[in-house]
């Protein structure tokens, strides 16, 4: 019997439930490959797999279901095929290539079919989106992630346990604009400049970034000369961008501007250099360019630190490639796995480092910093997906208690488990009331926003505001422009967030479903809890943490360190 062991481990009843379940796995990367293998071997009946990406060479070292011949193929379609080789228990696999946040491809009805959802994602936005759909549909799910040696597994039972948004997410480290644009002192400052300012301004979809934001700059410095200089620098780059497609002088003008003219202008702002070592403009001449042009194709080591000349050559060839590609592509975004964009950023940042007397870095090191990469470790992915599937499958056992788990596979670290924490009363996601709002096709075309406001205001007995999409205000007492607009014409009317101006009652999130008839949900809104000054609700209570197993190599338990629960960072993979 193929499932004899499973039956013994899970019990017959639980196994039956698992076998007749339909689950979703979101993400088929490092964690997803491991997890899908586990889910198939756990006996799940039907597994839907969603991923938006295709396979790259750099995935192959740990995403063991992919082969070299799979490069450029869809991750979800490829994993589904790969696990068929050991799909002894006959799971039905349904791969879907797409962005989980795409409401057209994955509408509400689609989400309703799942008994359980496994996240194997690498970014907060998508995780938070899955969280909000699970809250709406009260679908239990498993949130997990790894970062280097560390990982976490958090089963989430909507409204009964903390949701993904109950904990604050640590945003990625940011640097002051002036440090990046005027006074860098570390390699990471130059890398950030090359990737987030220079590359963005020259090649990406939109020219403006946080590093060109006048308000942000004004908050940081009152040095008028510096403010004016930063504006002039950015304007000149925009001019260069405008002629990029037809200029054969692009490279010369670029290098001359960013490493000479801009630097000379910065030097003229003497106050900047009273306590700092001033930069030295890059001296290079046309002969150097001719040398570059005749040099032809060349190989540069990924792990060796390039000389100034090598950096110039790398910048020359990568920018020429990007210029060529821009004849066909409208814009190019930075991608650490796109050789042209990675080489451009590596060379541009190293040349800036040279000008500011900062240590240069290898392309390999720059890739790690620019891609916000903490090297992914296959063993951690295997550990975490094993725990995620084992703990997630316990959900199908009656009365199974669920634990969150934080672990590290590094020597002398421990696996720490704790009961799932309760919802954070101040969490804006799970403290909100979520409801479906059914509107008939006819009403959608004929009713106006006024109708919705009239329906919603009595629920609060207060002035309300209504937002849609990513915090786009469509109504409040001082903004009634859309009131007479038909619902079908209000932009982004899909997920509707309602709040009272007095902030007394819980927020209401309405998911609009266009159907046969109009049905307004009956809602009784609760008061918002009063926020206390010292708020520890979003921390896991240390008393609850139970040491499950020590990882000390020498067996001496006094050497075991308890690992702090991993805080969620932007790029937990
Ligand atoms: N919104 C989304 N919809 C569907 N899939 C997503 C979404 N966001 C991320 N993913 C997928 O989640 C997976 C996360 O896997 P992983 O952390 O291993 O990332 P990766 O891109 O494969 O590797 P790396 O970032 O290290 O190169 C990726 O395959 C990615 O395409
Ligand atoms: Zn929450």
Image (tube, rainbow, N blue to C red):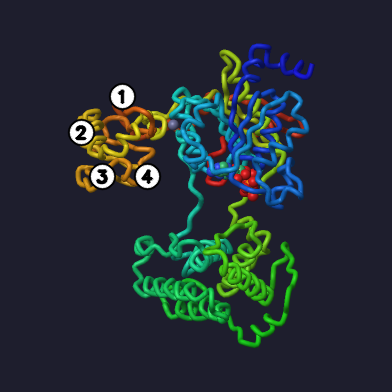
From mark 4 to mark 3, how far is it between C-alphas? 13 Å
Q: At which x and y percent is residue 545?
A: 56, 26
Mark number displayed over residue 492: 4
Q: Earlier in the sequence, mark 1 or mark 2?
A: 2
From mark 2 to mark 4, how far is it between C-alphas? 24 Å
Q: Mark 1 points at which residue?
A: 523
**Which tag is nearer the camera, tag 4 or tag 1?**
4
Q: Does the residue labelled 4 lie within 8 Å of ligand 1?
A: no
From mark 1 to mark 3, how far is it between C-alphas? 25 Å
Q: Name the residue under label 3.
A: 485
Q: Identify the residue shown where x is 68% and y is 48%.
A: 73
Task: Estimate how packed mark 4 is, as few (under 14), some (14 to 19) or many (20 or more) residues with alpha carbons within 10 Å.
Answer: some
Q: Is residue 188 left or right of residue 505?
A: right
Q: Name the residue under label 2.
A: 462
Q: Which of marks 4 and 3 is nearer the N terminus?
A: 3
Is residue 305 positioned above or below 536 on the image?
below
**Which tag is nearer the camera, tag 1 or tag 2?**
1
From mark 4 to mark 1, how far is it between C-alphas? 23 Å
Q: At which x and y percent is residue 244?
A: 52, 74
Q: Identify the residue shown where x is 39% and y is 71%.
A: 231
Q: Which of marks 2 and 4 is nearer the N terminus?
A: 2
Secondary element under disc 3, as helix, strand or loop, is loop
Q: Is mark 2 within 8 Å of ligand 2?
A: no
Q: Which of 15 and 326 is in front in this view?
A: 326
Whether residue 527 is visible here, answered yes or no, is yes
């Amino acid at each position: 019997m193929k499932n004899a062991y499973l039956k013994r481990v899970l019990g017959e009843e639980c196994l039956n439930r698992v076998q007749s379940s339909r689950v979703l796995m979101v993400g088929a990367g490092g964690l997803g490959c491991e997890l899908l293998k586990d889910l198939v071997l756990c006996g799940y009946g039907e597994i839907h797999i969603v991923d938006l990406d295709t396979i790259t060479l750099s995935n192959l070292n740990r995403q063991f279901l992919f082969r070299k011949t799979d490069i450029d193929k869809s991750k979800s379609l490829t994993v589904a095929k790969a696990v068929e080789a050991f799909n002894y228990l006959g799971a039905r696999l349904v791969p879907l290539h797409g962005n989980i946040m795409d409401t057209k491809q994955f509408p509400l009805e689609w989400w309703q079919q799942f008994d359980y959802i496994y996240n194997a994602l690498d970014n907060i936005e998508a995780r938070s989106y899955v969280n909000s759909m699970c809250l709406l549909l009260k679908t239990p799910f498993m949130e997990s992630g790894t970062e280097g040696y560390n990982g976490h597994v958090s089963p989430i039972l909507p409204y009964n346990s903390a949701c993904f948004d109950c904990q604050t997410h640590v945003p990625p480290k940011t640097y002051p604009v002036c440090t990046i644009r005027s006074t860098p002192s570390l390699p990471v400052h130059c890398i950030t400049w090359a990737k987030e300012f220079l590359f963005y301004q020259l090649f990406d979809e939109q020219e403006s970034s946080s590093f060109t934001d006048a308000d942000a700059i004004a908050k940081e410095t009152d040095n008028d000369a510096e403010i004016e200089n930063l504006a002039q620098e950015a304007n000149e780059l925009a001019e260069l961008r405008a002629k990029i497609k037809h200029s054969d002088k692009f490279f010369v003008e670029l290098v001359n501007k960013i490493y000479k003219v801009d630097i000379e202008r910065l030097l003229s702002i003497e106050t900047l250099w009273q306590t700092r070592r001033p930069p030295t403009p890059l001296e290079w001449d046309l002969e150097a360019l001719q040398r570059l042009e005749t040099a032809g194709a060349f190989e540069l080591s990924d792990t060796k630190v390039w000389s100034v000349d090598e950096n110039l050559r790398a910048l020359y060839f990568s920018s020429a490639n990007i210029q060529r590609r821009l004849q066909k592509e409208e814009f190019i975004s930075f991608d650490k796995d796109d050789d042209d964009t990675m080489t451009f950023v590596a060379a541009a940042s190293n040349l800036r480092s040279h000008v500011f007397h900062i240590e240069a870095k290898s392309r390999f090191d720059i890739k790690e910093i620019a891609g916000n990469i903490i090297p992914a470790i296959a063993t951690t992915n295997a550990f975490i997906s094993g725990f995620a599937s084992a703990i997630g499958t316990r959900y199908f056992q009656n009365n199974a208690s669920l634990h969150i788990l934080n672990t590290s596979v590094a020597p002398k670290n421990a696996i720490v488990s704790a009961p799932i924490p309760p919802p954070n009363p101040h969490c804006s996601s799970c403290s909100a009331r979520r409801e479906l709002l059914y509107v008939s096709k006819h009403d959608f075309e004929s009713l106006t926003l006024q109708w919705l406001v009239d329906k919603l205001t009595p629920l609060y007995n207060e002035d309300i505001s209504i937002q849609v999409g990513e915090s786009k205000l469509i109504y409040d007492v001082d903004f009634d422009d859309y009131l007479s607009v038909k619902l079908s014409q209000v932009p982004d009317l899909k997920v509707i967030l309602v709040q009272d101006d007095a902030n007394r009652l819980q927020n209401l999130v309405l998911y609009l479903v266009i159907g046969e008839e109009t049905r307004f949900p009956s809602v009784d809104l609760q008061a918002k809890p009063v926020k206390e000054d010292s708020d520890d609700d979003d921390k896991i209570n240390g008393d609850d943490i139970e040491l499950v197993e020590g990882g000390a190599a020498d067996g001496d338990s006094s050497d075991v360190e308890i690992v702090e629960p991993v805080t969620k960072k932007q790029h937990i993979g």
